[in-house]
Image (cartoon, coloured by chain):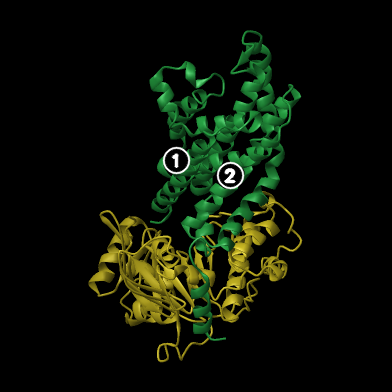
Amino acid sequence: MTATATARRLRRRLRRLEPAAISGVMSRDVTNFLTYWKATTFSSVLDPTIYLLAFGLGLGTIIAAVEGMEYVQYVGTGMVATAILFSSAFSAMYGVFIKHRFQRTYDAILAAPVDVEELVTAEVAWLGLRAGVYGVTPLLVTMIFGLDPAPGMLLVPFIGAVTAFGFAGFGVFAAAAVSKIDHFNYIQSALLTPLFLVSGTFFPIDQLPQGAQIASNFNPLYHCVELVRHAVFGFESSDFFHIGVLTVFALVMWRLAIWRMEKRLIE
Amino acid sequence: MPQLTFSDACVTAPADLSSWGQMPGPLAIRLRGVTKRFGEITAVDALDLDVPEGTCVGLLGPNGAGKSTTMKMLTAQAMADAGEIQVLGFDVPRDSKQARALCGVTPQLDNLDVELTARQNLAVFARLYRVPRHDRHAAVDRALEIANLVERADTPVDKLSGGMRRRLLIARALVHRPRLLLLDEPTVGLDPQVRQELWALIDALRSEGTSILMSTHYIEEAERLADTVSIMASGRVVALGRPAELVREHAGAQTLEVYGPPARLVEVREAAEAAGHRVRQTGTAVAILRAENANGTLPEGISRAATLEDVFVLLTGEEIE
């Protein structure tokens, strides 16, 4: 075979966003995950259990019901969004920063036939899938506290994956944007903590001043919380709006992450 | 003459390339006028560089000469501000992905996945380099053999020695049988035994027909492995040729090293320069080049064959930046 024939064959084959490149990068993530999945699973089960014990049994004695739900079930369903946020945004921020700047993993991957667009897509897709699966654990724990199973729950991993895709994209963007790992503290305290507290996880948004209620429409986590509760207790027509917002959020964050990583990775 | 019995006897002298130069043949790498600036600093300055297919070219230069930046531009991990880059006939960056599929890269810094085993590291890169599914297992086994790590295949990388990790890093770049290998400082920080082992490996690859571009600041490494050497300084190639030719052309045959107290060395240096010799400081001595032309006018000293190191220091300067 001549070099030009090989060249022609390759030119036709190699394009943008190739499944082979994306699955190759994800296979690396999966292989690594298999070395630490026990620790991840441990904390993803224990965290919601502790929260539910504290809020459900502690606060639950003062607050009997919220929006017609037992408080423990209200918090339990809301915590799906919290689990997704932590599993996606934080893993993306720290994981990507460490892989890029300390381990130099991305230098090796980009020397292979993988573009930044494929690399970022694979990282975000992997974290989205993982968080979608782990997002279910608070729901399972809440069942122990008396939540009845419902068919809509089967959609929770998909809602979780879309939300996590967006937050993982945000995390990758943040990892590319900051110059030092300590700067994640700003993002965590000024952005992620408020997002997670004012999302309807622990208390209903409609008790807040009107300005905060309007602002919460820009909080993807709020839409995730609403969708998950409706998946468990019954869907409403507003859910089309919620899933629309989450989809737009995921797409915008995905492209922003690619754009910022290209600036960071290609000199 | 005592016979040399180094363990690196398998590192052969570069093959005779007498046809090289007259018949350029196809080029694995072709750079023309390549320039890369970082703000005010010009890291690579109108660089021309050829790597003929099947040869090993050494890119020799002090730190900051632009070697690593040049390497990064070949895989489109740095974008040139000007000039043309072709790798295995593909235009870079336009068709860089196609070129990368046929290249192997060994970076200067170890970036293996330390939690994974040697085999897992290779398996991931076999996928990334698009080795077809049914060939992957054999490709990984072959790479383990190249790295001499068959026995340690299932050991996590963080339990491997420095030399084993470096061999694995090179084997990772070979898992898809690349036509071109880019080695960025392949033996930096390794002890002499490991270095010689890697030299034998690189030499074997070249003799199988893999084209190699190797950046290094170890002169002995370039001298032993490279068919031709490009000496870089401040982002440009300042000399190009086979190691022995470069020595003959720039440093002559004999170098005289004169030892003594610092004041004496200053005197010797001034006298030699006045007599028209090129002189360089070699730590504790003054080295007078082309001592064979001196006709007995030089002071007492130890005469030795001129080396590539003499050429390197002459051309890239004695000052440390």
Residue type at the position of mark 1: Ala
Q: Specify the label residue A174 is tagged with.
A: 1
Give the answer, above or below, for where A61 lies relative to A161.
above
Q: Where is residue A178? Give x, y as percent.
A: 41, 40
Of label 1 and label 2, which has the lower sequence position? 2
Q: Where is residue B87? Give x, y as percent.
A: 44, 74
Identify the residue position indicated by label 2 in the image.
A127
Quick check: can you spot residue B253? no
Q: Residue furthest front?
A: A237
- Residue drawn at 45 percent across, 17 percent down: A208
Q: Where is residue A164? Give x, y as percent.
A: 55, 40
Q: Is residue A228 left or right of residue B290?
A: right
Question: What hue does chain B carry in this figure?
Answer: yellow
Nearest the viewer among B91 and A149 is: A149
Q: Is residue B150 left or right of residue B307?
A: right
Please tell me in which quadrant of the rendered image residue B131 appears. Answer: bottom right
Question: What hue does chain A carry in this figure?
Answer: green
Quick check: can you spot residue A134? yes
Helix, strand or loop at mark 1: helix
